[in-house]
Amino acid sequence: MDIDALVQRINELARKHKTEGLTQDEVLERAQLRETYLQNVRKNFRQQLDSIEIVDK
């Protein structure tokens, strides 16, 4: 699942949670999607940090 589809599904579940509530399966799906999203953010941030090169003057 690409990041755009992931965020879209998380947002759909968030809207549904606010309006009518979620089933137990949807709560589990939401938790799994959020964890996947956070792992992706952490991975990207780590790559940015690893690409930084410190140069002494």
Image (cartoon, rainbow, N blue to C red):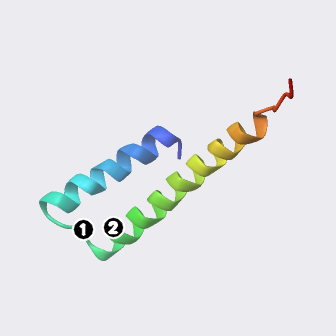
- In the image: residue 48, left or right of residue 34: right
* Rendered image quadrant of residue 5: top left
Which residue is found at the position 64% from the left and 42% from the top?
44
Which residue is found at the position 81% from the left and 31% from the top?
53
Does dot 1 land on a helix, a strand or a loop? loop
- Judge the density around disc 1: few (<14), some (14-19), many (≥20) Cα neighbours within 10 Å: some
- In the image: residue 8, left or right of residue 3: left
Instruction: Using the image, determine if residue 52 lies above or below residue 6.
Output: above
> Where residue 17 appears, x then y in whole percent?
22, 62
Q: Do the residues bearing badges 2 and 1 touch, measured as CB atoms within 8 Å?
A: yes
* Quarter in which the C terminus is drawn: top right
Comparing 20 with 48, the one in front is 48
As drawn, the residue found furthest toward the right would be 56
As drawn, the residue found furthest toward the left would be 19
Instruction: Using the image, determine if residue 48 lies above or below residue 27.
Output: above
Q: Amino acid at mark 2?
A: Glu
> Where residue 33 appears, x then y in whole percent?
46, 58
- In the image: residue 51, left or right of residue 40: right
Where does label 1 land, which residue?
22
Instruction: Using the image, determine if residue 3 lies above or below residue 35.
Output: above
* Rendered image quadrant of residue 26: bottom left
> Where residue 50 appears, x then y in whole percent?
77, 41
Where does label 2 land, which residue?
26
Does dot 2 land on a helix, a strand or a loop? helix
